Image (spheres, rainbow, N blue to C red):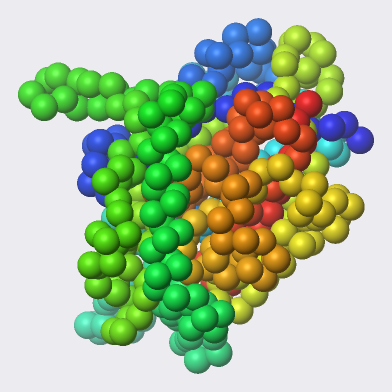
Amino acid sequence: MSEAYIVDGVRTPIGSFGGSLSETRPDDMAALVIRRLLERQSSLDPTRIADVILGCANQAGEDNRNVARMALLLAGLPTSVPGETVNRLCASGMSAVAHAARAVKLGEGDLYIAGGVESMTRAPYVLSKSDKAFARDAQLYDTSIGWRFVNPRMQRQYGIDAMGETAENVAEMYTISREDQDRFACITQGRATAARARGRFAREITPVDVPGEKRGETRQFEHDEFIRPDTTLEKLGTLKPAFRAGGSVTAGNSSGINDGAAAVLIASERAVSDFHLSPIARVVTTTAAGVEPRTMGMGPVLASQKALAQATLSLDDMSLIELNEAFAAQVLACLRELGLRDDDPRVNPNGGAIALGHPLGMSGARLILSAARELEVTGAQYALATMCVGVGQGMATIIERV
């Protein structure tokens, strides 16, 4: 079996809901990162790309009908290059990277582009069809996030708690206080602000041309705009619970509703040799796990444990842990269940989704890209990237610097 190497990767800056990327279609965002990635690796023969695999959680609007195939064609790749869109909700981008790495290891191809895209701003409203002639029971849903067209059996058996409600469930079950959640949110905002100020994200971001202030003008969008540098514990303490009366989960200690895209180049040993590539890291293993939907935030615990066992490694071997911050409540509960401190310096050293944002289909690929770049910067050996997934799953990937 060949090793699967992460050679390079780029992402857009993450846009706020209704922000700088609000006028950029998701297929155009995905095409941009694919094109920019290939421009950085000009020695590649595009016809050798075995597949383009992108994660996308929505697929109800401009990202419909296989956005990966649309994006690769818009990026100018040969029509002979196929494309596949995968959906594991929040971990869609991580699943895409896992699919590509697995295919390389099995010898199915030598070069893959994997990543993810999500425009939560441009997610459409969808209208159901009535199930009987002349009926008036059509339902309208906002597809930006959350349940829609729910099977009544699913609702009876598992409930359909919204994402924020699942965070409240975890906070209650694991006794995660509001104060601890706000403290964690404040720390991650500070880390992200500092990372942006020292240019850390420039190693992974490619700018996007977006409309300027005046008609017909364009400007370059090149910095994550969801970060809130002026965050303080005092300000976070003034926010009201967002999902449950008397709860502890607020807009300030939760991830955002965001837009963005990422693309990662995965190569075999043969491709590395043929094109004189310089890998950053190798993909050691990826695992997924299922948990109760109403406590979906705990998915990283079981997924990480499975990945570590499969790789015959331990948390002590991990120099870096990128744990997606869907909510501070679930991050803290996961850390404590894994036996880690709330302020473990290995966890999200450059901030996480509470500060950076969480474009669903993109986030898993962003975590892996950020982890690879951090290993490159620090010279450390192993990193764990893990995240919770809606409807009760977790996913984890371990990579090693080369």
Q: Is residue 218 above or below residue 197?
A: above
Q: Is residue 76 left or right of residue 268?
A: left
Q: Quadrant of residue 132?
A: bottom left
Q: Residue furthest right?
A: 1
Q: What residue sits 31% from the left and 39% below the top?
A: 225
Q: In this view, does 204 lie above or below 164?
A: above
Q: Residue furthest front?
A: 234
Q: Which of 329 and 106 lies nearest the eye of the viewer?
A: 329
Q: Which of 66 and 332 lies nearest the eye of the viewer?
A: 332
The x, y position of residue 226, in whole percent, is: 32, 44
Q: What residue sits 34% from the left and 26% below the top?
A: 222
The x, y position of residue 394, in whole percent, is: 63, 63
Q: In which quarter of the image is the N terminus?
A: top right
Q: Can residue 146 be seen in this view?
A: yes
Q: In which quarter of the image is the C terminus?
A: top right
Q: Is residue 81 above or below residue 141?
A: above
